[in-house]
Image (spheres, helix red, strand yellow):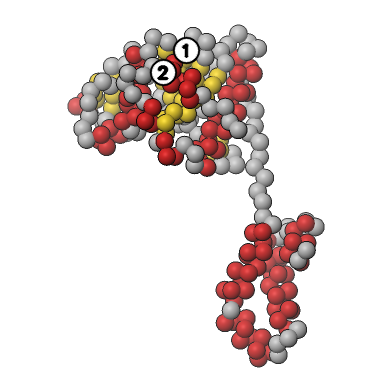
Amino acid sequence: MNRIAKAIKDGFVKEPADFLFKLSGQAVGKFKTYLDEDKLMNVVQSHKREIGQYIYSQLMEHFYCKAPSYEKPVVKPFTRIEEHNFSKYTKDSIHHYTETITPTNAIPSKVFSGFNKACHSLYKFDSKTEKDFAIVLEQDTTVLKWLRPASSQFNIYWKHNSIRYCPDFVVEQKDTINLVETKKIGDIETADVQEKAQAALQYCQHATEFTTQNGGKPWKYVLIPHNAVMLNMSFDVLAKQNEYKGD
């Protein structure tokens, strides 16, 4: 085992600056064993970047990051539905949710209304997929209520518990409450999407643990590829086909 690996194994790495100075000193010490003072200075100054890269590559061979487990949330008997803080808009920018918007990249700038099952009267959508999904929810007879949660609605965190995650939709059915994310199909297997999904799954598991003991409904996380969202589809089918169960 080289000196770097031994230092890591023995728990030497406490102060990063001190540790890096020590490693640099060891490298210079090694050069001193076969170079005189003039050649030593020339080698160090001319090849300092390569020396640094060599030390870094050895460090990375033994680097690992232990991700913390998702903390069990404190479940309250009642939590209000948070309101959205939309930027200023005019009446002529409000459209019925079934209205066709062209070009589709203009959808995020619009505000939509006319919902019968939503928990808010006005919503914005980030994409045509999300807007179409809202239509699916309104049409599906198994859907009792749904909402686009505000960014502060859920305490779900990812990226080592450093970033809050807000799912696209919450959908209530007779026997289930679903956290739903719609995602471009090519992005579903990316690390970020999977890490968010894992955090949401753990949240649902903790929520289910509480609700099943108190007469409530189980929670599920549903991750739907964008190309599966079609106006002739039912939410019930989409949820059953795309329930996320983790590894």
Quarter of the image with the C terminus in it: top right
Residue 155, image x, y percentages: 55, 30
In the image, what residue type sits under mark 2?
Phe
Q: Is residue 179 visible?
A: no
Q: Nearer the viewer, residue 16 or 128?
A: 128
In the image, what residue type sits under mark 1?
Gln
Q: Nearer the viewer, residue 198 or 234?
A: 234
Residue corresponding to mark 1 = 173
Q: Nearer the viewer, residue 188 or 75?
A: 188
Residue 224, image x, y percentages: 44, 28
Residue 238, image x, y percentages: 43, 21
Quadrant in the picture for residue 126: top left
Element type at marker 2? helix
Residue 187, image x, y percentages: 44, 39
Q: Earlier in the sequence, mark 1 or mark 2?
A: 1
Q: Residue at x 64, y 59 (%)?
A: 60
User: CA–CA distance between discs 1 and 2?
Assistant: 10 Å
Q: Residue at x 30, y 34 (%)?
A: 108
Element type at marker 1? strand
Residue 155 versus residue 190 in the image, above or below? above
Q: Residue at x 37, y 13 (%)?
A: 140
Compared across the picture, whether 124 is left or right of 153 comes to: left
Crowd band around label 2 with a 10 angstrom C-alpha radius: few (<14), some (14–19), many (20+):
many
Quarter of the image with the N terminus in it: bottom right
Residue 200, numbered circle: none
Query: Viewer-nearest of labels 1 and 2?
Result: 2
Residue corresponding to mark 2 = 235
Q: Are marks 1 and 2 in contact (CB under 8 Å)?
A: yes
